Amino acid sequence: MGSAQNNSICSLSIVGLLFFSIFTQAQQTTPAAATISLSEAIHRAQANEPAFANAVAAQKSASIDRYLAKATLLPTVVYHNQMLYTQPNGQTNQGGQGATQSAPIFIANNAIHEYMSQATINETIGLKQFADTRVASAVSARASAELEVTRRGLVSAVVALYYEVATTQTKQRLLIEAVLEAQSFTKLTQDRENAREVAHADVLKAQLQQQQRERDLSDAVLAANRARLELAVLLFPDPRTSYSTEPAGAPPPLPTQDEVNKLASANNPEIRSALADIQASNAEVSSAKAAYLPDLGLNFTYGIDAPQFAKYGPDGIHNLGYSISGTLDIPVWDWLSTQKRIKQSEIRRDAARVSLTATQRRLIATLEETYAEASAARLQMDLLDRSVLTAEESLRLTKLRYANGEATALEVVDAQNAFLTSGTAQADGVVRYQSALATLQILTGTL
């Protein structure tokens, strides 16, 4: 009765294992599945992520604003055309061309018939226009830096998800091997029980270990599918698209800390953004102070403003000509509005300076933390490799000792757990180093 029950449990376990193996293998070896490299994953994410698209749009919009601000420094040209007819009032007056004409009923108009066809060039010269151009240029530079910040944040998210997919697949493979190992040990205990070499307690211990490993495998399959879907949301229109990631190669060497610091200080978007923010704040202060100064307006008009739409009027009078005007508006009193605007811009400038120093401190701390993390992960990789080899050999020897009656079932289970733990730690160690190295590359702008 007990032997039949054990065989039934073993059969169910084998069926469950086959189900998980077929399920995972179908996902990973589908013929239509594409192998996505890390660089391709980053490129796809940049095309699909809305936050990155918004940052790109903001940068392009700021670039256009800078162009428009510079355009205000240049003269504008307008070709103006107009025809006026005014009801006469029954009287005559002396026309602007020396002849008598019917007087218009509206005194603001020059004649009953008036034709205007003029090209007008206007230019306004003032400190505010130059200051506003500096503001727009600084804002554009800040938008470009913020775009790079957003890009690096997206790259960081893609890298984390990409390596998470890789490590969940590795853990899933390790757990499949662990289930096979647990099944093998269960069969061994059953054979020894049938030979009356061990107690039934060993069989129960082996079965409990096998059931635990099957539950762990089920969780690993779920975690792998979840990781794949999270990454697929960034890569494909349909997150259910089948794909696979590239296998992890040999870990690249870690650059020296001096190289990392030099690259990060020369190519950090957070610092560039904070510096551009200060430049924009300084320009805003100048723009606010410019309200105390006068603006010079220049106008040049060339064309016709006459009772006839013609180059010459009666008796050969010239209708075609030009006029030049200049205005100087001197501000006198605005109820201290300019003073308040200056104060407001100075407050924002002081806040921008504080933000810059905080960003510099955070960059230094982040570089130190990340480099220490990468160094520690790199040093531990060799230890983890040796731990896997040691645990594998310990499991082999412990099973041999158990088969010869020199070890207990508990020792075999402990050896199995140690082997699985070391393999999992090795997979996590590889991802830890790759992720830390990728973070350094992101901070230095090389990824």
Image (cartoon, rainbow, N blue to C red):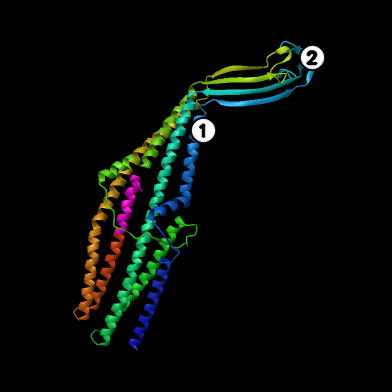
Crowd band around label 2 with a 10 angstrom C-alpha radius: few (<14), some (14–19), many (20+): few
The three-letter amino acid code for the residue at tag 1 is Leu
- Which residues fall within the magenta stretch? 430-447
Residue 142: percent from left, percent from top: 42, 38
Which residue is painted at 34% across and 64% down in the image?
170
Answer whether residue 384 is visible to the viewer in this image: yes
Of the numbered discs in the image, which one, if any, rests on residue 155?
none
Which residue is painted at 57% across and 20% down in the image?
299
Q: Note whether 271 is above or below 423 in the view shown.
A: above
Residue 371: percent from left, percent from top: 28, 49
Most common SS among magenta residues: helix
Q: Is residue 95 magenta?
A: no
Query: Badge 1 is on which residue?
Result: 68
Answer whether residue 205 is visible to the viewer in this image: no
Q: Note whether 23 is above or below 312 in the view shown.
A: below
Q: Of the residues under marks 1 and 2, which one precedes in the sequence?
A: 1
Q: CA distance from mark 1 to mark 2?
A: 51 Å
Residue 369: percent from left, percent from top: 29, 49
Residue 82: percent from left, percent from top: 69, 25
- Nearest the camera: 131 or 113? 113
Q: Is residue 112 left or right of residue 181?
A: right
Which residue is painted at 20% across and 74% down in the image?
397
Instruction: Give SS at disc 2.
Output: strand
Q: Note whether 236 is above or below 422 in the view shown.
A: above
Query: Badge 2 is on which residue?
Result: 91
Instruction: Give SS at disc 1.
Output: helix
Q: Quadrant of residue 404?
A: bottom left
